[in-house]
Image: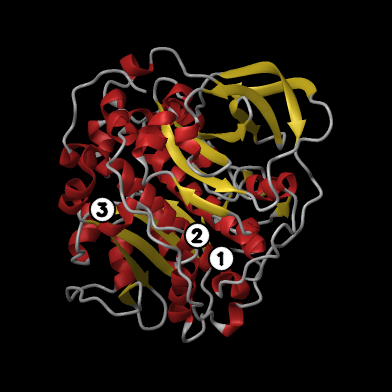
Amino acid sequence: MHAAATPLTLPQAWSLGTYRRLDQLQVPAFGADKAAATAQAPRVVTQQALHALPWQLPRELLSLGDFIGGQAPPAGALDTATGLAVLLRHLAAPLSYQPLNPYPVHRAVPSPRCAWPCSLLLLQRASQGVQVWRYEQDHHALADAGWLQGGDALLGTHTMALLGVARFWSLAERYGDSAPFNTMLEAGMAQSQVQLLARALGWAAEPLEHDPAALQAAAPLLQPLEAVGHALRFSPAAGPLQLNGPAVRTAVAGHQPGAGLLQRFTQLGALAAPFAAVGPAAELPPLATAALPVPAAHRGHGLLALMRDRRSGNDRPGLAPRLAPQAADAAAQLLALWRGIAAQRHTLPGEASLQPLLLWLQDRPALLDLHGRAQPVPAGAPLAQRLQDAMPSPRVRHTAAAMTCHALWCVDLADAEARHGAAALRRLHLAAGAQAQDFSLAATALGLFARPLRMLREQRLEADLALPGPIAYQVMCGQDRSTNTRWEL
């Protein structure tokens, strides 16, 4: 899956994923050449036979109140092709166009500078074996990708699976040595999204991260500098997928690995290895069965509508929130929604080593845990000022003054290494990404944008807030400005 490289210890690899990477790794996007910020892997155009998925899709599946309340849609309400089209559209297809955003085309799962480094493979059990389809996101269609030998170990008792292939090479032209960190965090966000969608569709499903044999069975589908990112196996209630009509042959644009990546980015191979490592078997925890409370003001939100409406807060000047009053209990509402959404999916192995925290910056600023309990912080500057002081960019430091809140995830590295061994780095980032997606959907329900980021001076924030461990991931939230024009695609 990657070239041989000198193995890194977990603390070594972790430190290279923090703000220190700017002077210890080769990261073109943050160098002197500003064009590198938008660099892409070499483009390639191929002729492919595509099977179109349904375009006439339901606008909604469940209200947020019904979803968190445990209500499932009627069994077989959608045929498998339509259900799959809903899932893939709200996972990877273009969803909105934002003309004043530097990156105008957006999808439901955010991506570093809208690069989308994860490709999607759909597997289905057939009489001849396990058939593989590749989802072409821009065409909302499936292309035949052959057959997987030994695929039964991947599917287990289920009939289908969706693999998000983390293509570290696809971000390397932009993020160089640090590409695996961003790629696996995005894979974690997609992991949450696909699990939530499967739950809303009423499909029996389970993530593959708990099953090392399933992950190893996917190895023939991977190229160098690739790994399984997010992965879910499932059994649609309406039975196997039936594709109607003949395939249409057309030109499809894509990307391919650039030449000499491991020579140009000398630590890329060493950092890709722990993100491709397969961890030990872990118990799959049961899904929540008890209905959780949903704040009354948000029960009517549609789940799919939230996924379509999620925003990054960007317009032409950059990250630009506006000051706006919040309800007195807004923090409590946000945390209740966050807990409720997270309970609708299986937890991932790495989540046991994470501690999520919310830095609430509006009235009565506080550092809160997931249950709203205030955490002790050292005396000193206002919390908003401490967050601003951790910003590396003066422009972002200025705009951060209007942020509503800031979520962050701290990790226990020793605990993660004891639980997951060589796969600790991979599982921590998958878990942090998944929890960030849960939180971001909750923030969207409150009318906030949700902007994931890593480029803060983590050590400064860890010290100023006396955090319980190093920071894995962060999400900034605020009110969009009226100039953030957005059209749904």
Mark 1 closeness class: few <14, some 14–19, many ≥20 residues within 10 Å: many
For numbered disc 3, what is the local secondary structure? helix
In the displayed structure, does residue 304 sit left or right of residue 82?
left
Residue drawn at point x = 70 percent, y = 65 percent: 74
Q: In this rendering, does residue 318 appear at all?
A: no
Task: Tell me: residue 327, above or below residue 385.
Answer: below
The picture places residue 173, in percent across and down from the top left corner, at 44, 25
Q: Amino acid at mark 3?
A: Glu
Reading the image, the residue beneath label 1 is 444
Of the numbered discs 3 and 2, the one sitting upstream in the chain is 2
Q: Which mark is residue 458?
A: 3
Write down the quadrant of residue 72 in the picture: bottom right
Cα distance, mark 1 to mark 2? Answer: 7 Å
Reading the image, the residue beneath label 2 is 450
Residue lying furthest front = 127
Q: Which mark is residue 136?
A: none
Mark 2 closeness class: few <14, some 14–19, many ≥20 residues within 10 Å: many
Q: Amino acid at mark 1?
A: Thr
Cα distance, mark 1 to mark 3? Answer: 25 Å
